[in-house]
Every structure is written in C-alpha cells, then in structure tokens.
Image (cartoon, rainbow, N blue to C red):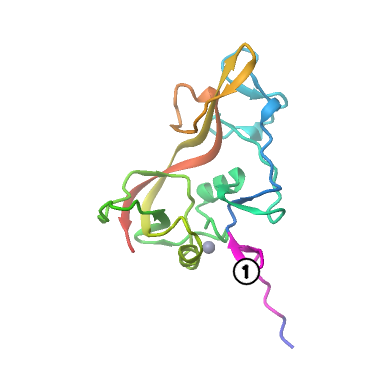
C-alpha cells in the first residue's frame, strides 16, 4: 500500500466552504501588542519598547509592531496581513498564499495588483508602484483571482527588480499625556527623517523593471 501524500500546510482552509486562507493573512487570535509597551526612549529622540529586544527593530533600526503568532486559530482576517509573515514573504520572495517560493521567470517575479477602474492597462502600468502585497506562485495567483473579492479585475505583473523601499505603519508623537497615534497610516521610505517616531507594521517594496503579463 502506498503512503498517502502529505497534505500541504498552506493555504489553510476555513469555514464550511473550505475557503483558502493565505499564509500571510492574520488570524483573530493573533494579537497586536502595542499600547502601553511603547514609550519615548531615554533621550527623548524616538520610540522604544519598555522591554525592547533586538528583534523589535529591523536592520534599518525601524521599530516594528509586535504581533503574536497563532496561524489557524480563531477566524481569518482577510483584510489584514500578519506583520511577521508579510515581512518574511517580502524579504524571501515567498508566495503570500502558500508560503513557498514565488514564481520567478526571466520576466521577473509574479505579483497580483488590483487594477483601478478606468486606468489604462499599459505594459509598464505598475512601474514604480509601492506595494505591501507579497508575490505569488502561479497556481496561487489563479486561486486568488477566484477567491478574493477585492481583486475584481487584477493584473498579473512581473517585476525583475522588486526593491525594499520602506515601511507602512503609523507615527506616534510624544505629548504631556504620553504617546499619541497619528489618525492615519503612512508609507515612509527607509532613511525618513522622522522614522524614529514610526511604528512599522508592513514592509513596502517598490516594483521596478515591471511588465504586465496578463
Ligand atoms: Zn503559492
């Protein structure tokens, strides 16, 4: 008798309809632990955690939001990417759905981008686009177009040079009553003058040497 092939861990499925849940998607039991743990550093020049450890910052010295890891627990939150798995997918160019290496050909690495209605689909449409959405492998890109409602008319884009650009997150400003979060989130490039007051939650890449392939 032959052994049954091992089922892949990702994508996990959820609910009565076995909806595929991407590797990078956050689950409801994965909690962001920010709040009271954050302070102004001793010299008052930027943010710090009270009990900061080296892994709280990236190689550019930017502080990251902490999030527990419990994929598969609770409900998937399809509109949120888990900060660690998003960052890992971007650094290692892993498929955001199955967590395996993304599709890479001579035309570049595969990304799926929502196409704003009314915009002309030129072959270099995505050139210079900033994105927090990690790449995909081909089977998962097809899967995503079938299951993701926000990808109504997606474009398959290949980038020969996806470049680490900066981070997405929010500023916190010191006030007499402690730190105050800015009401909106921002994209900032690495090297930004106020990066010391920024709490990152996603890595941002710039897609360069792009072409729309589908
Ligand atoms: Zn995949």
Comparing 169 with 49, the one in front is 169
Residue 20 falls inside the magenta stretch = yes
Residue shown at the point (68%, 53%) measured from the top left: 71
Start-end of magenta stretch: 4-21
Q: Quadrant of residue 97?
A: bottom right
In the image, is 78 to the left or to the right of 210? right
Q: Quadrant of residue 31?
A: top right
Question: Number of numbered discs present?
Answer: 1
Comparing 167 with 113, the one in front is 113
Residue shown at the point (34%, 51%) measured from the top left: 116
Q: Position of residue 89 (x, y in %)?
A: 54, 51
Q: Position of residue 64 (x, y in %)?
A: 59, 34
Q: Quadrant of residue 157?
A: bottom left
Q: Position of residue 193 (x, y in %)?
A: 45, 21
Q: Position of residue 166 (x, y in %)?
A: 46, 36
Please say if 23 is above or below 48.
below
Comparing 158 with 156, the one in front is 156
Look at the numbered disc 1 and give the secondary structure of its residue: loop
In the image, is 198 to the left or to the right of 212? right
Please say if 166 is above or below 51.
below
Which residue, given by chain and number where applicable, does mark 1 sit on? Answer: 17
> Label 1 crowding class (10 Å Cα cut-off): few <14, some 14-19, many 20+?
few
Mainly helix, strand or loop, the magenta region?
A: loop
Residue 159 falls inside the magenta stretch = no
Q: Quadrant of the C terminus?
A: bottom left
Please identify the residue farthest to the bottom as the structure is shown: 1
């Amino acid at each position: 008798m032959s052994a049954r092939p091992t089922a892949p861990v990702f994508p996990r499925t959820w609910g009565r309809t076995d909806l595929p849940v991407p590797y990078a998607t956050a689950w409801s039991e994965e909690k962001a632990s920010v709040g009271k743990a954050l302070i102004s550093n001793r010299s008052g020049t930027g943010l710090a955690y009270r009990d900061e450890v080296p892994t709280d910052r990236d190689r550019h010295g930017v502080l990251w939001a902490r999030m527990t890891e419990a994929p598969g627990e609770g409900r998937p939150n399809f509109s949120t990417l888990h900060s660690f798995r998003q960052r890992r997918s971007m650094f290692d160019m892993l498929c955001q759905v199955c967590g395996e290496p993304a599709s890479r050909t001579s035309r570049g690495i595969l990304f799926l981008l929502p196409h704003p209605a009314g915009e002309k689909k030129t072959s270099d449409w995505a050139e210079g686009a900033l994105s927090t959405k990690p790449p995909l492998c081909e089977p998962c890109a097809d899967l995503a177009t079938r299951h993701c409602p926000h990808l109504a008319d997606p474009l398959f884009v290949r980038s020969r040079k996806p470049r680490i650009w900066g981070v997405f997150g929010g500023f916190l400003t010191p006030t007499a009553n402690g730190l105050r979060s800015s009401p909106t989130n921002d994209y900032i490039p690495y090297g930004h003058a106020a990066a010391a007051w920024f709490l990152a939650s996603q890595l941002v890449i710039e897609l360069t040497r792009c072409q729309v392939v589908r």
